[in-house]
Amino acid sequence: MDAGAAEAPHEDAGPPASPPASFTLRYQLKDGGMEPIALTVDEQPTIESTSVLELRSSIGLRNYRIRVFDEADRAMVSDDSAEETPNGVVYRVSLPTPLKSGHKYTLVLDAQTGSTFTDTQGRELQDLRMEFQIAGEKEKEAPAPPPKNKKPEKKKKHR
């Protein structure tokens, strides 16, 4: 026996606490594969045009919503699906048309109701805003058609 070694009494603290939620964002390539988007605070990643975005969380989420906004801060129309797995949530945003080249977009994860959303452990999570830009030049907008109701021209005064 080793008289120098003493064991502290064991206390059962229950299961170990899971780490805080982490997120990964990926987009679908033209060949159907998925490519990660770097989530950095300092820079805005540039990606290829896509119509599918996928956000994965490392733990289940409650009372959340995910939306994609355009440069004018308008919510984009999308057909979304969420799958809860033992490893978290896989949320897929399917847009009816690919995102426009040269434009900036923001994926937002926030509370569906109230001011906060939580993970399955009940911990409150911060809203998440992920900005990215689509590679390429902005497409030229079609010129606006001339107004149909032209104002009558002012009559010139004769001197």
Image: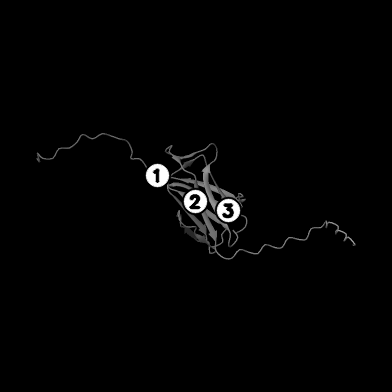
Q: Quadrant of the N terminus?
A: top left
Q: CA distance from mark 1 to mark 3?
A: 27 Å
- Amino acid type shown at disc 1: Pro
Question: Residue 52 at what x, y percent from top left?
Answer: 55, 56
Quick one: SS at disc 2? strand
Question: Residue 126 at what x, y percent from top left?
Answer: 47, 43
Question: Residue 23 at what x, y percent from top left?
Answer: 45, 50
Mark 1 or 3: in front is 1
Between 53 and 90, the one nearer to me in the picture: 53
Dots 1, 3 in contact, CB < 8 A: no
Q: Earlier in the sequence, mark 2 or mark 1?
A: 1
- Amino acid type shown at disc 3: Ser
Q: Is residue 20 left or right of residue 146?
A: left
Q: Earlier in the sequence, mark 3 or mark 2?
A: 2
Between 67 and 45, the one nearer to me in the picture: 45
Q: Is residue 151 left or right of residue 58?
A: right
- The crowding category of the residue bearing disc 2, from other C-alpha atoms within 10 Å (few below 14, some 14 to 19, many at least 20), is many
Mark 2 or 1: in front is 1
Q: CA distance from mark 3 to mark 2?
A: 12 Å
Quick one: SS at disc 1? loop
Q: Residue at x 47, y 50 (%)?
A: 56
Residue 103 figure quarter: bottom right
Would you name the residue on which mark 1 appears?
Answer: 20
Q: CA distance from mark 2 to mark 1?
A: 16 Å
- Amino acid type shown at disc 2: Leu
Quick one: SS at disc 3? strand
Q: Which mark is residue 94?
A: 3
Would you name the residue on which mark 2 appears?
Answer: 55
Question: Residue 64 at what x, y percent from top left?
Answer: 52, 42
Q: Residue at x 52, y 54 (%)?
A: 131
